[in-house]
Structures are given as structure tokens and as C-alpha cells.
Image (tube, grey):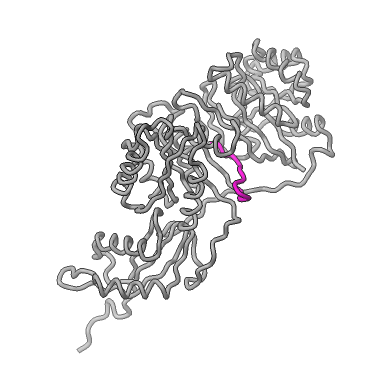
């Protein structure tokens, strides 16, 4: 049995640094700027022999409920309610500030067990801040340095003392995330090339939601899961960290990744925004399906197409969501126009699923998830070698490869080597001379013949070694 720990405190006391230290990965963005963290993030953590879930929260600020800091504070208060134990974090270097005293009262009223964490204790003059911390009435301050990993044994003992040994020592399930790496074709190797196994709809699925700032990504995830899990509002660029949310859809476990809005590279100047975009790109690489959220009122900006192209090059399966459909006056005409543009502007994933939705009203969400499931099935599909070579025989009879430098290219056979996305190996003579136009012809024919719409298709050209190459001709 595990327990939850929420890291609470005013901005810039090192909550995200402590979070990263406990989870053992640099998941949360860290910068000297106050207020970097906005959404609450939950992840499995380990502190020596203790295994638990830790919640990173936004810095507590005293502000109106309708303002962005006020909405961030509401998310932090939810984390306090969810947690079994609170790490109330202060900056020992700067000492107590009025906000520390105000929020210590909020934590005390919650009635939850509290461990007072005095971070940045390695700094010169931190001893004075440590002594001041006793004034909060939250017990003995535990001096730590989250950045350098100092004081962790004392923190572990404080957790055991606060919750009791029976509560803290339980079984845990570690879920290590790894990115599968391929050689030339991106995807997973196929053990038996002649097998066409059935699609397993019980396996968990990873879905990343990406798009330009203010397209409605966080609102869409909140609408899907049916709760205000992520911070939303009229301001552009609210989301900074890539936040994962666990969700159950029709009995299937799904992990949703919300990402920061991606602007054009030329417009990004701040270090924090660069880190946010890099975090979003990492979420894309971990995902299986990527929902590209487009603002239906201004769709297909140059940046939208660049995001889509990046997803396709990474080998992920894209699905387009035309959001803010409730603001459209002529939906039928616009939908036909957008679908024509989709086919024309994204020919490399012909047949991509594109669904009009409204995250604000909840319209079209079931259709969106049905499109996600269909695309995921195609992304995982396998074609047996026998079917592929019967198809190749017909293709070569209809349109044989061209002659290059007076010698006709020969295509011998084809097999599928990988899935996720589908990757095929074509055995031919002189792969370096094969025109890209003919490779595209093979790819498009594969897509049509075996019903593989809307996903990237990888084709690698190979040639067999000539055993007589390099030998002098005997007379």
C-alpha cells in the first residue's frame, strides 16, 4: 500500500528540484524564475526504502480566485486534499517571509501530517532561516539540499515518524519508461513475419496532446477525463510542464500527456519556453498516438504543419482535432474545406483521421477517441510476407521500376520488418539508384492495398551481397 506526499510552499523555494530528486529524473522544469510550475504533477518516487507517489505543486500565492495565480492556488489546495503527507518547503537561505506564515496556517488547518523541509540548507547563512522555521509551529525543520541531495536520510526518518512504520512500508510497482530504439526503421521488431496477430485492445495506450499556444489542449484533456485536472484560462501559454494524466476509457487504461504550446522557433527567446518545448518533444517521443489540436477558427498555420511533420518523422500516429467547433457558423462547408486541406497539406499520412470537436461543450469527444483507436490499430498492424509479395507481383506487372543509366532496376521481394509504425524492407538491385518517386509509389500502393490510412509508412531498400564482387575475371 502506497501513500501520497504533496510538496507545498511559496514560489521559488525549490519544490520542483525536490520533486526531481525524489523521482530520480529531471521531469519537472526548474529555473531561477519564480512561478515556473503551474499544474500539479504526480509521479512515483523513492526515498531509500520508502516508495510513494509525490505531487509537485505550484507556488502558493495570495491572489483572487479568477486570476491565474488564484487558479494555480486552487490546484495546490486540491493536492493538499489528495495527499496523505505534506512536505511544507521553505527557503532556509532567505528565511521566513509573510507568505510562509500565511500558508503554514492553511496547511495546519488541513489536519494532514506535515514535514517541515528547510531547503537550500547548504547555503551560507541558512542556519538563521532554520532557526526562524521553528516559529511556524510545524515541528522540527529538516535541513536538506534538493539540488545536491544532502539531508535525504533525515527526510526519510521524518516521513516514517510522521506516518508510522505500518503506513509507510508497503509494496510498490515500479513503472520504468523506456524508449525503444530501432536501426533504420523506427518501430518494434516483428518476430514472425508471416504472422498477423489480432489487435490487443486491453494494453494501455499513451496519447500526447500537442498544438500551438491557446489551441485548447488542456481544456480538451479536462473535457475527456471529466474533471478540472489541468490549469486552463484565456491566457496563452499557461501550460509549461508536460503533465501526464491517468485515465480509464471504456475499460482501457490511457495515459494522457498535456504539453506546452509550441510557437515558431524564431519567436522563442526565453530559456523557460525553450525548456517547455523540449519537454513537449520528449512527450511526443514517449507517446503512441499524438492528437494535434488545431484552432478551427485559424487552422493550418505554418507552425501546425511543422508540428505535424515532426510527429510523422518521429514515427508517431497523428490524429487531428479541429477544436473550438462551437465558434463556427458554417460547420458543414468548413469541414469539407478542412478535410480537403488536410489531404493536400499532409500527403505523407494520406487518410489521416480529422475530427471536429469542442472541448468547451464536450461535442465530438467520443468520435475523437474512436478515431484514436482506429489509428492505433493501423499503427500496430502487420501484413504477412505472402500477402505482401502477391501484392508486389501485381504492382511490378502494372508499373515496373524505371531504368537508371540504361539498366533496369529489379525489385525481388518485400517483407514487413517492424510495426509501430509499419516498416517494410524491399529487396532490390542498386538501392542507391532507386528514385524517390518510385519509393513513394510503393508506399502509396501499400497504404491503399492493405488499408493503412493516416500513419507514417517506412520503406528501407536493401540489396543482397554479391559473392563474386571484387573478383577478377578469369580467362
Labels in figure, total: 0
The answer to which image quadrant residue 90 occupies is top right
Residue at figure coordinates x 44%, y 68% from the top left = 383
Is 250 part of what is drawn in magenta?
A: yes
Give the quadrant of the N terminus: top right
Please report the residue visible at 60 percent of the width from the left and 16 percent of the height from the top: 61
Determine if the magenta segment contains residue 102. Answer: no
The C terminus is located in which quarter?
bottom left
**Looking at the magenta stretch, what is its main secondary structure?**
strand
Q: Position of residue 438 (x, y in %)?
A: 26, 63
**Residue 72 position in % (x across, y down):** 58, 23
In this view, the residue farthest toward the top is: 98
**Horizontal placement of 271 versus 461: left or right?**
right
- Span colored in magenta: 243-253
Q: Nearer the viewer, residue 294 or 166?
A: 294
Q: Measuring from the top left, give residue 96's x and y in whole percent.
A: 67, 13
Q: Is residue 338 left or right of residue 318?
A: left
Amino acid at each position: 500500500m502506497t501513500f501520497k506526499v504533496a510538496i507545498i510552499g511559496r514560489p521559488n523555494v525549490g519544490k520542483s528540484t525536490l520533486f526531481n530528486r525524489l523521482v530520480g529524473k529531471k521531469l519537472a522544469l526548474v529555473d531561477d524564475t519564480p512561478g515556473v510550475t503551474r499544474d500539479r504533477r504526480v509521479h512515483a518516487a523513492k526515498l531509500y526504502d520508502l516508495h510513494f507517489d509525490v505531487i509537485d505543486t505550484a507556488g502558493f500565492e495570495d491572489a483572487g480566485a479568477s486570476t491565474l495565480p488564484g487558479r494555480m492556488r486552487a490546484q495546490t489546495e486540491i493536492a493538499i486534499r489528495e495527499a496523505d503527507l505534506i512536505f511544507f518547503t521553505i527557503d532556509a537561505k532567505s528565511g521566513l517571509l509573510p507568505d510562509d506564515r500565511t500558508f503554514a496556517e492553511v496547511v495546519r488547518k488541513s489536519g494532514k501530517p506535515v514535514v517541515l523541509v528547510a531547503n537550500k540548507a547548504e547555503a551560507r547563512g541558512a542556519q538563521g532561516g532554520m532557526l526562524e522555521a521553528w516559529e511556524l509551529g510545524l515541528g522540527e525543520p529538516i535541513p536538506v539540499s534538493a539540488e545536491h541531495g544532502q539531508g535525504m536520510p533525515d527526510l526519510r526518518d521524518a516521513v516514517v515518524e510522521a506516518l508510522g512504520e505500518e503506513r509507510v512500508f508497503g509494496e510498490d510497482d515500479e513503472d520504468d519508461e523506456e524508449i525503444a530504439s530501432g536501426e533504420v526503421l523506427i518501430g518494434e521488431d516483428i518476430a514472425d513475419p508471416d504472422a498477423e496477430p489480432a489487435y490487443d485492445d486491453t494494453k494501455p495506450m499513451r496519447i500526447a496532446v500537442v498544438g500551438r499556444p491557446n489551441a485548447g489542449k488542456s481544456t480538451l484533456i479536462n473535457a475527456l477525463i471529466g474533471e478540472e485536472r489541468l490549469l486552463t484560462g484565456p491566457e496563452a501559454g499557461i501550460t509549461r510542464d508536460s503533465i501526464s494524466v491517468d485515465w480509464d476509457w471504456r475499460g482501457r487504461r490511457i495515459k494522457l500527456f498535456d504539453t506546452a504550446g509550441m510557437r515558431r522557433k524564431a519567436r522563442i527567446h526565453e530559456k523557460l519556453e525553450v525548456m517547455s518545448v523540449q519537454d513537449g518533444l520528449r512527450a511526443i517521443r514517449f507517446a503512441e498516438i499524438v492528437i494535434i489540436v488545431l484552432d478551427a477558427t485559424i487552422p493550418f498555420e505554418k507552425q501546425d504543419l511543422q508540428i505535424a511533420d515532426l510527429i510523422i518523422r518521429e514515427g508517431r500516429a497523428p490524429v487531428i482535432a479541429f477544436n473550438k467547433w462551437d465558434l463556427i457558423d458554417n460547420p458543414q462547408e468548413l469541414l469539407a474545406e478542412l478535410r480537403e486541406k488536410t489531404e493536400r497539406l499532409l500527403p505523407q499520412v494520406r487518410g489521416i483521421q480529422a475530427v471536429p470537436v469542442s472541448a468547451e461543450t464536450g461535442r465530438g469527444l467520443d468520435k475523437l477517441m474512436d478515431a484514436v483507436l482506429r489509428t492505433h490499430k493501423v499503427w500496430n498492424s502487420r501484413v504477412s510476407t505472402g500477402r505482401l509479395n502477391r501484392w508486389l507481383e501485381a504492382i511490378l506487372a502494372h508499373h515496373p521500376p524505371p531504368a537508371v543509366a540504361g539498366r533496369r532496376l529489379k525489385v525481388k521481394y518485400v517483407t514487413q520488418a517492424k510495426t509501430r509504425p509499419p516498416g517494410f524492407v524491399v529487396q532490390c538491385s542498386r538501392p542507391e539508384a532507386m528514385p524517390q518517386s518510385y519509393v513513394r509509389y510503393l508506399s502509396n500502393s501499400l497504404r491503399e492495398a492493405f488499408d493503412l490510412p493516416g500513419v507514417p509508412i517506412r520503406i528501407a531498400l536493401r540489396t543482397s551481397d554479391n559473392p563474386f564482387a571484387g573478383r577478377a575475371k578469369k580467362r
